Image: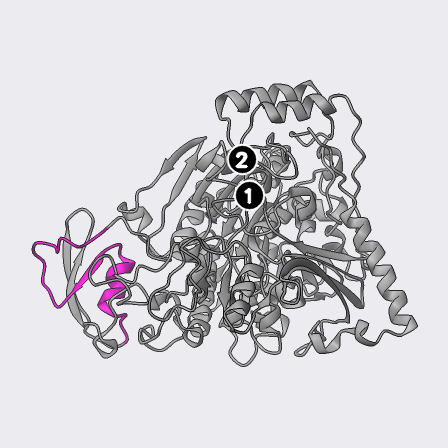
Amino acid sequence: MNKRFPSALAASFVLASLAACDGGGGGGGSEPVASSPNILFVIMDDVGIDQMRAFGYGGATPPHMPNMETVAHAGLRFHNTWSMPECSPGRAAFFVGQYPHRTNIRQAIGPQDLASSQLSPFAMTAPKLLKKANYESGLFGKFHLAGPENNEAGHSTPALLGWDYFYGWVGGLPGSVDTSAGGVAPEGTYSCGFVPSAAAGGAETGACYKADNSCTVIQRTSLVQDPPGLQCLDSGGIFVPHQTCGTPPSTLNFTRENGYYVSPLVIIEDGRVEEVALSDPRARRYRTRLETDAAIEWIKSRPAGRPWMATVSYSAAHTPWQQPPGDLVPHIDGAVNDGLDCKGSVAGRIIQNRMTEALDTEFGRLLVETGLATHGDDGQLVYEPAATNTVIVIVGDNGTLAGAVKQPFEASQAKGTVYQTGVWTPLIVAGPDIAEPGRSVEHMVNMVDLYRLFGEIAGIDVDAENPHTIDSAPMLPYLQNPEQPSIRNINFAMAGFNDQANGGSNGPCVISTSCTQIPTTKSVCEDNQGEWWGPGYNTGPGSTVIDNGGVGYEICADVNRALYKNGRSMLNILPEDSATVRDAKYKLVRNSTRQYRPETDTIEWETVEELYEIDQAVPRPLLDTPDRNLLAAATPEVQQVYERLKAQMENILASNPECRGDGNLDREVNGRDLEEWSRIANAWGLSSVYDFKINGVFDGLTNSLDAAVIQENLGKPCPPSYAVY
C-alpha cells in the first residue's frame, strides 16, 4: 500500500503544482501539472566536493558553475555526503539503496566483469520502485550499472532494470580520443582528437566531410571562433586541413570513436533497442550537449498528469580529457585553448575545469528549456523552486580523479580510495516548500539514502514496497525541519575488485610511482595518463614495461616482483580491498593489498588500519592524510574510539550473510531458483546471477554445476540480512 508524501510537504507540492511553470511535460505555460512531484536527478561524473565553490571549496581555480550554484543556494547543500570510491558502485548505491557488499559491485564495471558484479535483474531499482506511484522514468547519458558484456540482456539492461526510456551509453565510459582525427593524420598526431588552429600546428581553413558524403568548407574569420577542426568535429564531421571540398581522402574513417565527440549511442523506447552506428549523425555530437538535448526532448514530451523521474547522467568530467566547444564555456573570452596536450597532466587540469563548466552551462539550458528556470536580463539563471512541481537532486558519483584534485584536498587519496577525497561528494536538493532553503546540512548522509528519498518524494512506503534489505536512512526530515538532528550514527563506504571468470582481475596500470587495478582496460589506463602492464602492453619507445614474453602481468604485486628483480624501484600499490566507517568526529580506514616480499620472494596480503579525526571546515577541512593517523601513537581514548568503529564496520560487513544458491535475491533457495536457472542455462548458458562460485571462483557459465549448488541448498533457511545506519 502506498503511503502518500508526508503531511504538510505533500500538500505544498500539490498547491505548488497549481502555479507551476513546468507543465506535466516540463514545457511551461498554463499546462496542467502532475500533483506528485517530478524528479530531476543530475549526476556529475568524477566531480568531488573539492571542485565545488558552492560548498566552500574549489581551490585557487574552481570551475565556473553559476547555474548549479544558483540552485544550490535556492535549496539545500548536504555538506557531509559520502558515495563509493568509483562510479558503478556509487551509482548502484543510489539506484537500489544498497552498499556494495549487497550488490557485489565493488569497482567500475569493465568488459571482463561477470553478471554477479552487475546490477541484478531482480533488484528493486528506483524506477521499478517509482512505478508503484505511476512514475515514468528516463535515463540520459552514462549507465554503467550492468552490461552490455557478460549479461544476457546486453544493451537492453536499462529496460530490464526498469527505465522506460534510455538514451546514452550502456558501458558508460567515453572511448579514447582518436589522435588521427578521423584518419586525417597518423596516430598520435592530434592529442585532442581534432585538427587545431594554425598557431598550434593546424589550419584556419579546410574541408569538413560528413558520413553522408556532404562537405562544407570552414574558414575561421575571427580568433574568438573555435578552430575549424573543432567546429567540424562538433558538427559530426571530419576535417581535412587546407583543402576544399571534392573527393574525400580514402583514409577518412567514420567508424572510430573519438572521446566525447563520437560515441556508440544506444536508444531504448518501449523495450525496443536501437544501437546507433558511429557514422550516424546522432552519435557524432559532444556528449554533454547530446545528453542535455535528449533529456529536454523527453521531459517536454511527458503527458500532463503523470509524474516523471529524469536522470541526466552526465559523462563529464570523466577522462579522456577533451576540450568542449567554446560556446559551452561562455565566460572564457575567446576560442577554446587548442594548444594543449590532452594527454598531459597540467593541460588535463585546465580541460577538466572546462568540461565541468560546459556541464554547468548545459545544466542551465536544461532548466530553462524545460520551464524550471528562466534567464534574467543579465543572462544569469533565475530559479524559483516554489514555482515548480519538480525536485532537483544534483550529485557527484564519486571523488575527483587524482590529477584534477583541488587543494587542500589530497591527490594521492582521490577517486578509487576510501579516503575523504575519494568518497566525499557534493549533494544538492532543491524544490518547492523546502524549509529555510539556502542552508547547509552538516549531518552525515550516504548516497544510498537517495533511494529512500526518491520513494519519499513519490509518497511510497519504501520498506513496505521493497522485498530486499536496503541501507538507506531517511532524508526527507532534513528537507522539512531545519532543526532535524542527525539520523545516521555512522557512514560507510567500501571498494574492491569485481568478479571475473576464473579469479581474474583488471590488469596493472602504472601511474607515476603507483600501481592500480582500477582502469578496466589498456585504453582506459592510457586515457588516465597511465602505462599498462597487463595483457597487450607496449614495449616501444618510451615504455618502461619489463617484457615477460608478451604475456603481461596479472596484478600489481607481479609488477613489483619484476621491478625488484631487474634492479628498479618498486611502486606504491593502491589498495585492492578497502572499507571505511565514520561517526560525527572520527573515521576508520581499512586497506588490504597484495604485496611482494623480496626477502621471501612471495606475494602476501597486507591489511592496514588507520584512524583519523575529520571535519567539514571551510575552506580547509581536517582530512585523513597519512601524517594525521591517530593509531600511530594511540592513547587509551583513541584505542576506545578505534574498537568502537571497528565493531561497527564489522557489523556492517556481516549484515548480508551469504545465501548460497539464491539467484533472485529473495533469500530463499527454492523451486523458483531452479526454474530461473533452467531458463538461463538453456537460453543463454553464460554469465548470470545463477553462476555460482565453484571451488572459490566463477567460471562465467550457467550450467549443471550451478544447478547442483541450488539442489544442495534447496529448502535450507538463509541467515537474515539487516540494515545498519
Determine which of the numbered discs, if any, sits on residue 210 in the image. none
Q: Amino acid at mark 1?
A: Gln
Task: In the rendered view, tell whether residue 207 sits above or below residue 145.
Answer: below
Is residue 648 visible from the viewing direction of this image? yes
Q: Is residue 315 above or below residue 96?
A: below
Secondary structure of the residue carrying tag 1 is loop
Left/right placement of residue 1 relative to residue 108 reads right
Q: Residue at x 54, y 57 (%)?
A: 518
**Colour convention:** one colour
Q: Which residue is mark 1?
A: 500
- Crowding at mark 1 (Cα within 10 Å: few <14, some 14-19, many 20+): many
Three-letter residue code for mark 2: Gly
Task: Give the mark, 1 or 2, whose residue is nearer the N terminus.
Answer: 1
As drawn, the residue found furthest toward the right would be 636
x, y percent for residue 147: 49, 40
Residue for point 12% across, 56% down: 249
Above or below, comparing residue 340 to residue 608 in the picture: below
Residue depicted at x 24% and y 67%? 195
Boundaries of the magenta span: 224-253
Residue 601 coordinates in the image, percent (x, y): 62, 62
Write down the residue under mark 2: 700
Q: Quadrant of the N terminus?
A: top right
Residue 377 seen in render: no
Q: CA distance from mark 1 to mark 2?
A: 7 Å
Residue 321 in the figure: left or right of residue 513: left
715 vs 314: above or below: above
Q: Evaluate if marks 1 and 2 touch, with contact meaning CB atoms under 8 Å apart.
A: yes
Q: In front here: 588 or 259? A: 588
554 inside magenta stretch: no
Residue 294: % across, % down: 41, 47
Report the front residue among 654 and 154.
Answer: 654
Residue 193 sits in which quadrant? bottom left
